[in-house]
């Protein structure tokens, strides 16, 4: 049996035969009886082999004159020089006759080898599908829909390896002189199969499973007419290209458009440019991803052209019309612009203004080094795409107005509004240097003398809870699978079932001890690759159908395993994180009004956040130590509110989760610097870096000589290492106790040493459970802070 999965040649047998053409002439002779009818009939009678399949094409030479005359019924001799037509063996690129125009323009061997076809993946596949459709229509009585019609336009795109250009031809096939021969009695094809075939019309392998090439032959000859539609198709394609966002700003996309224009004009050396002016009437050249993607052809080697007065550009711009200079060398009114073009080898140029709402916003430039190739008639070839070039350029110009912010986004990702002014300054400097043609990088951005406030609201024992949830789900899944397989084993005594049940028990014994690294993935793989496929084997057994359905109802539709406890944990964790994150964001509204500051938060199993305060962060505000005290008290009040919200949230959670909260107090100012590689701020200096080390490790701190974790639910831990902080925070505690936000139970603790952090101390305060605390309005919060600081 022939394997058609790698189809490289037309699979059906074709045979040249002039029988239908001969019969056409004989019929014409009988009905019209021309004066030379007798001579024609005699010549036909002398060549009986023309009525039979012709295997040896050398026979054509013997009857060359007769065949040429007979073919005038299909190809008019008057069109020799203009019409690209050929007679050929059915579905083969073996011609028996070609017009002079066809010989001049088309290389058939190249067509079959490398031409692209608009429907199928290649020419061979296209011919094969075409043949199958004809067979389906003739022998199976299928009325072909508009989508499947065999007369649907066929387009060949042919690449010229010498010029590098492409030509597009619409192919018309004349089928009146060939026929399909069935070599055997045909079996009917199920209507459902036919419907499926027509839905998969370009699946050649599928079609050849039902329409066997060995059962059919094509006899006669076909007429191929090729009509050059390069201009229409390329214009349409360019319109589509220009709809893309980066059509003229990405080098590879711009090059594609330029190449298509070359095909339209049949000029391999055609150059495409786009120019537009800034407010000072100077050409601005935009560059794309590291190289010049699109540019003005008149760009000077050192800088944009300085003076367009009197140039051909000014004429086209102001007069809003096409301008063509067929030979710049003989152009009598040269300016610096024309001289620049000549220095670049441009001798022939066509300019077309890009007009938006009666305003000229740019210029399309086409140029070549050969005088006279571009002329006023050439302008008509690009007229249809000018509106799309205009839209593309308008889009670029609008994007230029936000280029500074784009530079910031590229270098720095999203920037907090408080410090955005500094990044805009840096972005403005970059843009100015780029416009001058200078190479530049985004300057370093740093802020000195800022005070950090760090806080953490962490989900208590999240890793333990997550592992417990995973362990519970996997054990439940294994137990359900075992129960089901035991039931099946009782009815179907299969050794494989006993073996799998044994493996289930082994996996369950491992999980019962602890959830070790890799256990989760091992069990899930076991369930998905062994258990579930084994259960599927019994799907059609009515005795087990209900039990299997119950088993599957307990599996997660996405993950394919039991995911109830884990899902509950993840949902609870997500709710807690969302509550904390939303509260922090809302609190920021009030905090920013107290004094503008930089704020960032990170979400893991809980939320940690950092504030930076200082004059250097703001453009025109002076920072006073009073603001630092404001924010420290604000932080305590906010964390009390988070704890109250957590208490209200607990009954709604699927898992019994709680949070712990911690504050790290750093009493010295530090410097922060933006790190472009990580798109975030980091501290500078050895002492400041020690603060970062402590911040990353402090949530694991233990109270000295007790083995007790510092952080506990319902309490806030305040970690510090300088004595002067103690008195400040004790004043805050007095106020919070008076307001019944916290209990009088204030713990003063010494912490175990941490790597890189010695001598740390901590307060631990207990939040009251009987007072409802809500987010205070701005005025009330400021009043509370002033009262606590005895500033009234």
Image (cartoon, rainbow, N blue to C red):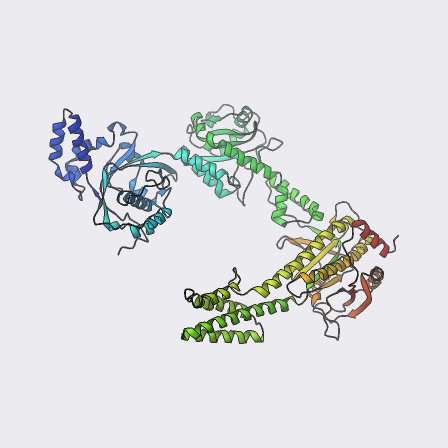
Q: Position of residue 557 (x, y in %)?
A: 52, 60
Q: Position of residue 669 (x, y in %)?
A: 77, 57
- The answer to which image quadrant residue 702 occupies is bottom right
Answer above or below: position of 22 versus 127.
Answer: above
Q: How many numbered circles does the render carry?
A: 0
Residue under the point 48% across and 70% down: 484
Answer above or below: position of 503 versus 195.
Answer: below
| Image position of 276 (left or right of 262) | right
| Image position of 30 (left or right of 701) | left
In this rendered view, identify the residue nearer to me: 770 or 569: 770
Residue 480 can be seen, yes or no: yes
Answer above or below: position of 308 versus 557.
Answer: above
Quarter of the image where the N terminus is located: bottom left
Q: Position of residue 578 (x, y in %)?
A: 66, 56
Residue 204 can be seen, yes or no: no
In this rendered view, identify the residue nearer to me: 145 or 715: 145
- The answer to which image quadrant residue 396 occupies is top right
Answer above or below: position of 396 versus 633.
Answer: above
In this rendered view, identify the residue nearer to me: 175 or 700: 175
| Image position of 183 (left or right of 479) | left
In this rendered view, identify the residue nearer to me: 527 or 627: 527
Q: Position of residue 245 (x, y in %)?
A: 53, 41
């Amino acid at each position: 049996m022939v394997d058609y999965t790698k189809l490289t040649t037309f699979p059906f047998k074709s045979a040249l035969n002039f029988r239908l053409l001969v019969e056409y002439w004989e019929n014409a002779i009988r009905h019209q009886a021309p004066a030379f009818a007798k001579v024609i009939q005699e010549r036909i009678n002398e060549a009986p082999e023309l009525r039979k399949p012709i295997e040896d094409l050398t026979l054509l030479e013997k009857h060359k004159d007769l065949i040429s005359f007979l073919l005038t019924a299909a190809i008019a001799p008057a069109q020799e020089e203009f019409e690209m037509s050929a007679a050929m063996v059915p579905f083969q690129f073996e011609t028996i006759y070609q017009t002079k125009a066809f010989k001049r323009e088309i290389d058939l061997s190249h067509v079959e080898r490398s031409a692209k076809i608009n429907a199928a993946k290649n020419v061979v596949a296209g011919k094969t599908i075409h043949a199958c459709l004809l067979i389906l229509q003739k022998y199976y009585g299928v009325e072909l829909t508009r989508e499947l019609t065999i007369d649907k336009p066929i387009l060949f795109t042919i690449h010229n390896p010498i010029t590098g250009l492409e030509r597009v031809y619409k192919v018309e096939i004349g089928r009146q002189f060939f026929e399909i021969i069935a070599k055997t009695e045909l079996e009917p094809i199920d209507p459902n199969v036919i419907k499926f075939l027509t839905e998969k019309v370009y699946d050649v392998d599928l079609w050849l499973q039902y329409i066997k090439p060995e059962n059919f032959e094509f006899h006669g000859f076909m007429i191929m007419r090729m009509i050059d539609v390069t201009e229409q198709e390329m214009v349409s394609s360019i319109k589509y290209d220009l709809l893309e966002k980066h059509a003229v700003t990405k080098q590879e996309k711009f090059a594609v458009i330029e190449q298509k224009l070359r095909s339209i004009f049949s000029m391999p050396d055609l150059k495409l440019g786009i120019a537009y002016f800034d407010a000072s009437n100077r050409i601005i050249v935009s560059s794309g991803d590291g190289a010049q993607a699109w540019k003005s052809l008149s760009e000077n080697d050192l800088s944009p052209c300085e003076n367009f007065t009197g140039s051909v550009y000014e004429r086209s711009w102001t007069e809003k019309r096409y301008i063509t200079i067929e030979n710049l060398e003989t152009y009598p009114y040269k300016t610096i612009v024309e001289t620049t073009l000549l220095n670049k080898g441009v001798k022939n140029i066509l300019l077309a203004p890009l007009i938006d709402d009666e305003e000229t916003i740019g210029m399309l430039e086409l140029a070549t080094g050969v005088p006279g190739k571009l002329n006023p008639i050439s302008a008509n070839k690009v007229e249809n795409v000018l509106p799309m070039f205009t839209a593309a350029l308008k889009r670029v110009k609008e994007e230029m107005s936000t280029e500074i912010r784009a530079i910031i986004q590229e270098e720095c990702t999203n920037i907090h509004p408080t410090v955005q002014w500094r990044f805009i300054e840096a972005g403005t400097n970059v843009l100015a240097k780029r416009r001058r043609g200078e190479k530049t990088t985004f300057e370093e951005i740093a802020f000195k003398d800022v005070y950090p406030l760090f806080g953490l609201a962490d989900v208590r024992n999240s890793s333990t809870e997550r592992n417990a949830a995973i362990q519970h789900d996997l054990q439940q899944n294994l137990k359900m699978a075992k129960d089901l397989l035991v039931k099946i084993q009782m009815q179907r005594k299969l050794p494989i079932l006993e073996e799998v049940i044994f493996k289930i028990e082994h996996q369950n014994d491992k999980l019962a001890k602890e959830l070790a690294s890799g256990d989760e993935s091992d069990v899930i793989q076991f369930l998905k690759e062994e258990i579930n496929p084994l259960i599927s084997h019994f799907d059609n057994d009515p005795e087990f159908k209900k039990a299997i359905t119950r088993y599957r109802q307990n599996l997660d539709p996405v993950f394919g395993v039991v995911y109830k406890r884990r899902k509950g944990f993840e949902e609870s964790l997500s709710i807690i994180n969302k509550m904390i994150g939303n509260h922090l964001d809302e609190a920021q509204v009030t905090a920013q009004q107290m004094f503008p500051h930089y704020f960032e938060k990170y979400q893991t199993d809980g939320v940690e956040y950092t504030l930076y305060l200082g004059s250097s962060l703001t453009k025109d505000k002076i920072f006073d130590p009073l603001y630092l005290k404001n924010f420290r008290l604000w932080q305590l009040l906010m964390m009390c509110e988070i704890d109250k919200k957590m208490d209200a949230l607990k009954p709604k959670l699927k898992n019994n989760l709680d949070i712990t909260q911690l504050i790290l107090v750093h009493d010295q100012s530090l410097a922060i610097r933006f790190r472009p590689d990580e798109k975030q701020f980091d501290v500078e200096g050895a002492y400041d870096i020690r603060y970062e080390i402590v911040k990353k490790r402090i949530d694991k701190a233990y109270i000295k000589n007790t083995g007790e974790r510092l952080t506990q639910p319902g309490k806030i831990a305040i970690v510090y290492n300088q004595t002067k902080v103690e008195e400040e925070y004790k004043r805050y505690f007095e106020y919070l106790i008076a307001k019944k936000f916290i209990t009088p139970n204030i713990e003063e603790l010494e912490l175990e040493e941490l790597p890189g952090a010695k001598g740390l101390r901590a307060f631990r305060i207990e939040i009251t459970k009987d007072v409802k605390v809500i987010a205070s309005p701005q005025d009330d919060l400021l009043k509370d802070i002033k009262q606590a600081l005895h500033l009234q």
